[in-house]
Image (cartoon, rainbow, N blue to C red):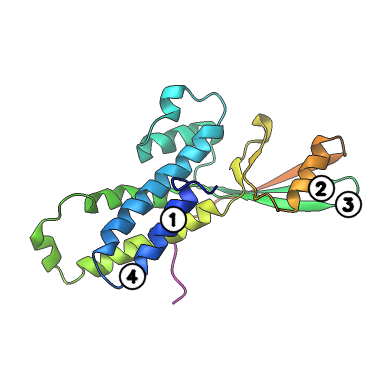
Amino acid sequence: MNSPVSSVSYLSRAQALCKKEDKESLFYAALELRCGIEARLREHVAVAKDVPKSRAREWKIAKLAKTVDGSFQLGDSMVIVFLTLADGRSCQFMYSPVSTQLQTIGERCGDYLHAIQPERLESPTFWTEFRSLLVEGCGLLNLACSSEILRPILSDGLHFNLLPDDPRITLLQDLNSGVAGSFQVAKLTPLGPMTYYPSE
């Protein structure tokens, strides 16, 4: 997705802004991150089955997340889909959700997208906590955007988002053209809230 309003584009801009030294850039990073979370949820909603048009046009994180959860019923679970063709070729794909923790971060970003009361800046931890929130959010959104599956329900027909040069496209095309094959699904459910810690 090369669109400037795709989740990946919002994420890229948020990450770049977080790396800047000036504190002011963090406010713009919060906007990009929040929009990226909304965009990723909308990308899932756009391919979900039987979603009313009014819900498909929604933009609030909580309402989008409710629609996704109602369609997929996976919560924070990740899904790995294995495709095996009769001729021995195989590949795998992943679905990673916009997690509950990421949704919470997106909502918290909204707190920074209004005029800030000057006394809030007097807290010695304001900027540290703000940057930490954005770094965690960018990490979790990166995970959500790294998955190739937008609709992870086999009974509804899987919906993939693959780059044109992805070699797995050939296997999917061969499956669609009649080569025998099968899907196997593994669901991974976290025991607690998913989070992200930067390597440095």
Which numbered disc, 4 or 3, marks the residue that appears first in the sequence?
A: 4
Between disc 3 and disc 1, the foreground one is: 1
Which numbered disc, 2 or 4, marks the residue that appears first in the sequence?
A: 4
> Nearest the camera: 154 or 1?
1
Between disc 2 and disc 4, the foreground one is: 4
Q: Assign a secondary structure to mark 1.
A: helix
**Cα distance, mark 2 to mark 4?**
45 Å
Per the picture, the main secondary structure of the magenta-coloured stretch is loop
Which corner quadrant holds the C terminus?
A: bottom left
Read off the residue under disc 2. 84
Read off the residue under disc 3. 88
Amino acid of disc 2: Thr
Q: Which label was assigned to residue 20?
A: 4
Q: Assign a secondary structure to mark 3.
A: loop
Between disc 1 and disc 2, the foreground one is: 1
Which numbered disc, 1 or 2, marks the residue that appears first in the sequence?
A: 1
What residue occupies the far right of the structure in this picture?
87
Read off the residue under disc 1. 11
**Cα distance, mark 1 to mark 2?**
33 Å
Mark 4 vs 3: CB contact within 8 A: no
Mark 3 vs 2: CB contact within 8 A: yes
Amino acid of disc 3: Gly
Mark 1 vs 2: CB contact within 8 A: no
Mark 4 vs 1: CB contact within 8 A: no
Which numbered disc, 3 or 1, marks the residue that appears first in the sequence?
A: 1
Q: In the picture provided, is 153 more to the left or to the right than 98?
A: right
**Residue stretch rendered in magenta on the structure:** 195-200
Residue 194 at least partly seen: no
Residue 7: image location, x then y, percent: 47, 48
Q: Assign a secondary structure to mark 4.
A: loop
Q: Dot 2 surroundings within 10 Å: few (below 14), some, or many (20 or more)?
A: some
